Amino acid sequence: NEVSTSIFERDLIPILAEMFIKKAAKLTERQLVLDFPEVARAFAKLQIHHRPLLKTIAARCQKPGMLRQMTDWGLSALMWSYTGGFPDAEFSEFRKSLRGEVARRGLSEERIAQ
């Protein structure tokens, strides 16, 4: 019983993810703060686990001071994406950093779930 995938999942998502990874290397911190949460949330909502993309986002966001620059919405989107959408053990350190910033700001579970 073979699981079928759509052309979107099989062909387009990897292309889009690779394009974003390449572009991410050239983004300013301001652009990262805006774009990374959107991309992570979109992939999580679609339940698409593209590891290289997820690793790129986590690595760049863990640089000193990056999470503090995130808007509350951006931080919440990342937290939701990497806890509910991508609960993989591989991202446990990133989740720890996210939880620390969420706690520092006093963001509620309701806020994160939005």
Image (cartoon, rainbow, N blue to C red):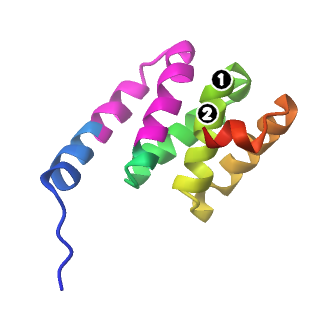
Q: Work out which residue is located at the far bottom of the displayed protein and give it.
A: 1
- Does 91 sit left or right of 25 as displayed? right
Element marked by disc 2? helix
Q: Position of residue 61 (x, y in %)?
A: 61, 33
Badge 1: how crowded within 10 Å, few (<14), some, or many (20+)? Answer: many
Kindly report the secondary structure that dominates the magenta region of the rendered protein.
helix
Element marked by disc 1? loop
Q: Please name the amino acid that badge 1 sits on.
A: Met
Q: Please name the amino acid that badge 2 sits on.
A: Cys
**For this rendering, which residue is in front, 7 or 23?**
7
Identify the residue position indicated by label 1 in the image.
70
The N terminus: image quadrant = bottom left
Q: Residue at x 84, y 38 (%)?
A: 103
**For this rendering, which residue is in front, 28 or 45?**
45
Q: Earlier in the sequence, mark 1 or mark 2?
A: 2
Q: Position of residue 36 (x, y in %)?
A: 50, 30
Q: Nearer the viewer, mark 1 or mark 2?
A: 1
Q: Position of residue 7 (x, y in %)?
A: 13, 53
For residue 36, above or below residue 81: above
The stretch drawn in magenta includes residue 92: no
Disc 1 versus disc 2: distance between alpha carbons? Answer: 9 Å
For residue 90, above or below residue 57: below
The stretch drawn in magenta includes residue 32: yes
Q: Which residues are magenta?
A: 17-42
**For this rendering, which residue is in front, 40 or 63?**
40
User: Can you tell which quarter of the image residue 75 is in?
Assistant: top right
User: Can you tell which quarter of the image residue 105 is in?
Assistant: top right
Contact between marks 1 and 2 (CB within 8 A): the answer is yes
For residue 113, above or below residue 28: below
Dot label at residue 61 = 2
